[in-house]
Amino acid sequence: MQLSLILGLVALIFVVATVLVIAEDRRAARRAAQRRQARLADLGEVDPLATQRLQLDR
């Protein structure tokens, strides 16, 4: 009984920690993307992939 309770609590803590790490990674990636876009805007480039999306008439 006590062993299953302890294992359940450990599993719950592990799941919560995993969710927190994933959320922090996503938040950090979003901040990095915003900083990257701000640096590009400072250089005058709004969208670095815009030239790749353009299609020429052939």
Image (spheres, rainbow, N blue to C red):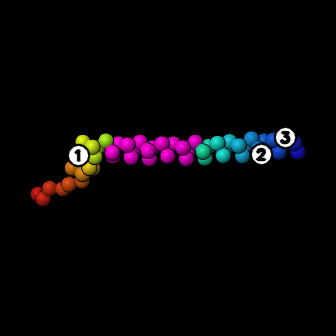
Residue 38 screen position, x and y as percent: 33, 45
Closer to viewer: mark 1 or mark 2: 1
Mark earlier in primary sequence (1, 3): 3
The rendered magenta stretch, by its main secondary structure, is classed as: helix
Q: Nearer the viewer, residue 33 or 16?
A: 33
Classed neighbour count for the residue bearing mark 1: other residues with Cα under 10 Å, few (<14), some (14–19), many (≥20): few
Q: Quadrant of residue 29?
A: top left
Q: Residue furthest front?
A: 42
The disc placed on residue 44 is: 1
What residue type is disc 1 on? Answer: Gly
Closer to viewer: mark 1 or mark 3: 1
Mark earlier in primary sequence (1, 2): 2
Q: Nearer the viewer, residue 49 or 27?
A: 27
The disc placed on residue 3 is: 3
Mark earlier in primary sequence (3, 2): 3
Q: Is residue 25 left or right of residue 46?
A: right
